[in-house]
Amino acid sequence: MYEILQSAHSGLRWLVLATLIIAIVNSFGKTKGGVTFSSKDKKKALFALIFTHIQFLLGVVLYFISPKVVFAASSMKSDVLRFFLVEHVIMMVLAVILITVGYSKAKRTAMDGKKFKSIMLFYLLGLLLILAAIPWPFRDLGGSWF
Ligand code: HEM
């Protein structure tokens, strides 16, 4: 069970990153208005939101079953244990909030330019946080590429 969730969480990062980048790039140059926010644009933003939320749910389950999360004060002294206990989760939760806010702001406004702007800005901030909080193999935190 743990191995399946770990592989899913690790692999899904690529779908999260890809769908976020597609939604962000799709909004470039359309924030001034004049371009209709079509159902295709909405779908791109929605896919990124859904994959980010699935990744969040997998992360929450892993948080309570992963051997890398040790609920002890001494964990703060180890770079790896502190990363998974505190840093990864805080930054990822913030990123998920930003992306969710971006999507709902775009949904609520009637102006097409503002919809694109909201997706571009909030998704970009979320993406940057996610990139910074992923335990990439070169960071020596025990993470892998897939
Ligand atoms: C969009 C959000 C997230 C992304 C892109 C993401 C990405 C990743 C990646 C790439 C790994 C390393 C997997 C590996 O190399 O084996 C990882 C590990 C982990 N993540 Fe996340 N994560 C996200 C959100 C979360 C959240 C919200 C939590 C907790 C509430 C969480 C908990 C964990 C845990 C506990 C591990 C260590 C799993 C293990 O190897 O035992 N993640 N995450």
Image (cartoon, rainbow, N blue to C red):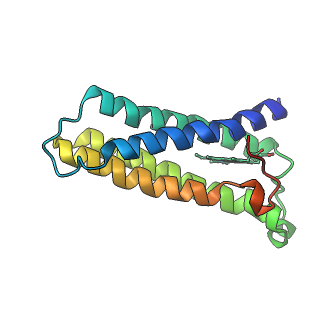
Q: Which residue is drawn at 48% across and 38% down?
A: 19
36 or 102, which is in the foreground? 36
73 relative to 47 in the view: left or right: right
Q: Which residue lies furthest to the left in this view?
A: 34
What number of labels is visible?
A: 0
Q: Is residue 89 visible?
A: yes
Quarter of the figure with the C terminus:
top right
Residue at position x 82%, y 29% from top? 1
Q: Is 59 left or right of 92, judged from the image as shown?
A: right
- Place of residue 104 in the rendered image (x, y in percent of width and height, measured from the top left): 34, 42
Residue drawn at x 15%, y 47% is 33
Q: Residue 17, how many percent across, how many down?
A: 55, 44
Farthest residue to the bottom: give it.
Answer: 77
Residue 52 showing in the rendered view: no
Residue plotted at (30% across, 50% down): 118
Q: Is residue 1 left or right of residue 118?
A: right
Q: Position of residue 120 (x, y in %)?
A: 35, 50
Q: Decide if residue 122 is on the left or right side of residue 91.
A: left
Q: In which quarter of the image is residue 37?
A: top left
Where's residue 112, x and y in %?
Answer: 19, 41
